[in-house]
Image (cartoon, rainbow, N blue to C red):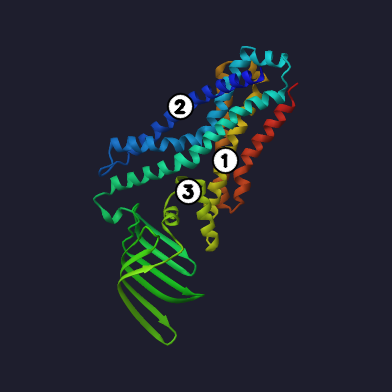
């Protein structure tokens, strides 16, 4: 019997959450599309803006799933409470803990879905969408096709004038240091990374600074090996939200090994983990509410409560994450505080149910 009830509650919660998520994505996608229409240029026109918006929907779904899970659970469980189904379950001998466990199954399913979206689907599609938009906008202007980048490899600093998705860099400047002394400066007219992650430098001119003089070396083609490979370089020019958790961890490790500031990427990583974990809490929090005044309330009241709590969580998360970077606060603390607060509120609300 418990298994049947668990499946019934899961179907109810997931159906309501799916409906809410579709509505939220429709609104978010519309706003995203309107914003893109204000910046169409080159080959980037309405059709490309629609494609860009569609490709970004998985990442938007990942960001909105905690709110959708809360509102959907409130609507689904609230409807069950309004039909006295929750009361019948309690009368049949099910405890609050058992009901919470049954509801948590829906949260676990949504947590897995959120993890898949945030790790394997959303980031690569978001990265592809941004590259597609850049190429369409500046296809006829090679000087603007790509991003300028500075990267560090131990005591060597690399300045890439243009990095495009094919990892053709144009001019490359290399500054090598020996402790605090500049050892050499080199410039290559063209550069790139081959399939073995070797750096191919063409028309390289290097000026070496010795204690007894200066030496200039030239080479038509040179093969160099740096710690920075195509994956790390791609991570350095991509927005953090376009990176998977694995890519974030790899880039954080690279930054730490080179004594560079990794706060922005650490914040994004822990924010993503906490946001994913919060999806598990939302259905249980909704269950605590439906035992109270929402049991006899209408759909509008449940919807309003869900929107208020969801927006409060979203604003608190965004504010703390951004302020943590500004004031150099611990990324784990600022990203997990809203989720831990929600968990404590859920436990307190459940403990008051008789």
Cα–Cα gap, marks 1 and 3: 16 Å
Work out how far the residue at label 3 is from the one at label 2, CA to CA, in angstroms. 25 Å
From this view, report whether residue 198 is shown above or below residue 48.
below
Position of residue 170 in the picture relative to residue 225 (left or right)? left
User: Picture quarter containing residue 35?
Assistant: top left
Mark 2–mark 1 distance (CA, rounded to whole Å): 22 Å
Q: Position of residue 258 (x, y in %)?
A: 52, 63
Q: Quadrant of residue 311?
A: top right
- Residue annotated with mark 1: 317
Residue on which disc 3 sits: 240
Q: Earlier in the sequence, mark 3 or mark 2?
A: 2
Q: Earlier in the sequence, mark 2 or mark 1?
A: 2
Q: Quadrant of the C terminus?
A: top right
Q: Sort mark 3 into few (<14), some (14-19) or many (20+) by Cα contacts within 10 Å.
A: many
Report the mark closest to the observer, 1 or 3: 3
Dot 3: element: helix
- Quarter of the image where the N terminus is located: top right
**Around disc 2, counting alpha carbons within 10 Å, would you say few (fewer than 14), some (14 to 19), or many (20 or more)?**
few
Front residue of 239 and 39: 239
194 up-or-down from 110: above or below: below
Could you say whether the residue bearing mark 2 is in a helix, strand or loop?
helix
Place of residue 219 in the rendered image (x, y in percent of width and height, measured from the top left): 31, 74
Tag shown at residue 22: 2
Taking the spot 23% from the left edge, 50% from the top edge, the residue there is 140
Residue 122 placed where, x, y %?
45, 40
At 32% from the left and 64% from the top, the residue drawn is: 171
Residue 221 location (% of width, % of height): 30, 70
């Amino acid at each position: 019997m418990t298994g049947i009830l668990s499946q019934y509650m899961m179907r109810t919660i997931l159906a309501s959450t799916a409906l809410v998520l579709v509505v939220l994505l429709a609104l978010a996608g519309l706003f995203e599309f309107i914003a893109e229409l204000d910046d169409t240029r080159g080959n980037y026109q309405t059709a490309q803006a629609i494609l860009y918006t569609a490709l970004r929907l998985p990442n938007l779904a990942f960001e909105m799933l905690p709110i959708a899970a809360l509102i959907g659970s409130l609507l689904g469980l609230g409807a069950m409470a309004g039909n006295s189904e929750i009361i019948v379950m309690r009368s049949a001998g099910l405890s609050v803990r058992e009901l919470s466990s049954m509801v948590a199954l829906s949260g676990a399913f949504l947590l897995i879905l959120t993890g898949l979206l945030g790790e394997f689907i959303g980031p690569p599609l978001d990265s592809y969408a941004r590259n597609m938009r850049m190429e369409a906008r500046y296809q006829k202007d090679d000087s603007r096709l790509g991003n300028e980048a500075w990267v560090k490899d131990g005591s060597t600093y690399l300045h890439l004038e243009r990095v495009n998705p094919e990892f053709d860099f144009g001019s490359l400047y290399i500054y090598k240091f020996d402790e605090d002394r500049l050892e050499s400066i080199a410039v290559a007219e063209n550069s790139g990374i081959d399939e073995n992650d070797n750096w191919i430098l063409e028309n390289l001119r290097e000026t070496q600074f010795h204690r007894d003089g200066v030496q200039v070396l030239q080479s038509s083609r040179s093969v160099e090996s740096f710690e920075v490979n195509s994956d790390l370089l791609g991570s350095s020019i991509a927005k953090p939200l376009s990176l998977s958790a694995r890519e974030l961890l790899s880039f954080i490790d690279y930054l730490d090994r080179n004594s560079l500031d990794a706060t922005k990427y650490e914040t994004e990583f822990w924010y993503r983990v906490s946001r994913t974990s919060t999806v598990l809490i939302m259905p249980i929090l909704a269950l605590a509410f439906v035992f109270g005044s929402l049991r006899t309330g209408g759909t509008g009241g449940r919807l309003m409560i869900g929107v208020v709590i969801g927006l409060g969580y979203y604003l608190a998360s965004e504010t703390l994450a951004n302020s943590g970077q500004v004031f150099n606060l611990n990324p784990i603390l600022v990203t997990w505080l809203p989720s831990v607060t929600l968990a404590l509120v859920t436990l307190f609300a459940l403990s008051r149910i008789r």
